[in-house]
Amino acid sequence: NLAHFGLIGLGTMGAALAQNIAEKGYPIAVYNRTTSVTDEFMANAGDLAPRLIPAKSLEELVAAITPPRAIILMVPAGPVVDQQIEALSPLLQDGDLIIDAGNANYADTERRDRQSEGETYDFMGIGVSGGEEGARHGPSIMVGGKPAQWDRVGEMLRAISAKYDGEPCAALMGPGGAGHFVKMVHNGIEYADMQMIAETYALMRDGMGFDATRIAETFEAWNKGPLASYLIEISGKVARAVDPIAGGPMLDAILDAAGQKGTGRWTVIEAQKLAVAIPVIEAAVVARNLSAQVAARARGADVFGAMPQSLPKDALDTDTLEAALIAGKILCYAQGFDMLGRASEEFGWKLPMPEIARIWRNGCIIRSEMLNDMASALAANPGENLIFADPFTRLVKENEAALRKVVIAATGAGIAVPALAAGLSWFDAMRTPRGSANMIQAQRDFFGAHGYKRLDGKDAPHGPWWDKTAG
Ligand code: NDP
């Protein structure tokens, strides 16, 4: 037996990943619950067939792999992963490694890591981004685990990963659930990137009266500038696509209700647990929730009058929109990296921040040119928020006015831009030395005697109201 690797779950991602691994020269044994799927996979294996070893049972799979084994799970996140671990573990021996490569919640990965202690098998969780195409030809891989585990599988993972200027987009993030946590924040940022792009689309379509071709041309132009990224690229492509059924722009035939599998929501929940501010991502998740309320939105339009209205002529141009999106994107990533930094401290992970930006430069859904500069900025300014690191300080200064102009124009016309507006509000708060939380502190002291700090440092922990109410 040549294979040291095995893979369970030949669905969309598993099949593509197995082919990628075989293509890079690693023989791999594969198993799928439904055997006909395995048969079909092998029938389509072509040149890769000699390096793919099909197994009809877990016993056959384990027998086909030479110890020490590393077995990748590519099955739906949640209970199925636990079931697979339970079914596999009696068949394994010391030194064998189970790798969960699905979209697990990082807390489940931490639990499974703990559970593996004293068992016959070792466990690690890795986040894989890039969809089917990425899995087949080079995903971005965010690895959680011990350095010794990374030493075992790192060479293979780097080989199958995407490359940016020849550098592999796969790296060890930290122990336990660190890889899946970074993948989760990646997905949260993905929600925000997509939402901000959708907001600029709404401004062009409803506010500026652009047709689909002009919208497509605008995204195509942006993809040649600072916003160059996979998501801007595909936005141009979908705007240009023609509906094969009814003719006309494909976008116009699609219901405006966004689906979600929950990783964006997880990001928001974990941010709240950490008490960090990621309002752009929060706004993006809320916008998806709200988009699904199709009937309520129609009722709202009936009762209160339909929005949006078109913008006054010449209120906005595409250069201003582009600049606003640049600012919004930077503010969003500043929040995402801030969340990673806080999680790193809280969990003692020592997350390699510049490395995270580096492995996001290619393979994953949020891949973009800007991430290359972010990697350098995070390396040159350890522990610093991205907005305080050049060139991003300069870029925010240059593009802030455009963001404000867009939010004001959108608000005036009733075009909802929750993510861009959330970015702007966060930015305004971040440059307000004297905020309004003194009012909150006074209220808290009034009703709950929670106390406050005085600006002059004098020792008087309660306000005059408290003396009175206390009688
Ligand atoms: P698919 O639905 O395409 O495939 C699921 C696979 O899991 C199939 O092989 C299926 O086998 C198997 N499976 C399902 N239920 C069970 C079960 N109870 N016991 C044993 N095997 C089972 O999913 P994807 O490939 O899209 O996703 C796999 C993982 O990768 C998920 O965690 C997903 O979140 C993650 N992921 C997906 C991405 C994507 O773009 N699709 C991107 C990044 C991560 P069978 O043929 O028998 O049904």
Image (cartoon, rainbow, N blue to C red):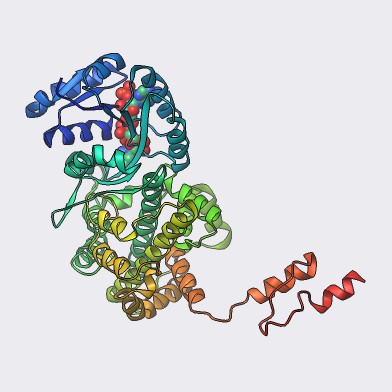
Between 328 and 456, the one lying in front of the other is: 456
Residue 302: x percent and y percent? 55, 57
* Residue 378 relative to residue 281: left or right: left
Residue 288: x percent and y percent? 45, 51
Quarter for ligand 1? top left
Residue 21: x percent and y percent? 17, 35
In this rendering, the answer to whether 79 lies above or below 412 is above
Residue 134: x percent and y percent? 22, 44
Q: Is residue 290 visible?
A: no
Residue ranking furthest to the bottom: 456
Marker count (numbered): 0
Between 205 and 137, the one lying in front of the other is: 137
Between 398 and 273, the one lying in front of the other is: 273
Residue ranking furthest to the right: 471
Residue ranking furthest to the left: 47
Query: Which residue occupies 9% across, 23% down?
Result: 50
* Residue 102 relative to residue 286: left or right: left
* Residue 26 relative to residue 412: left or right: left
Between 191 and 309, the one lying in front of the other is: 191
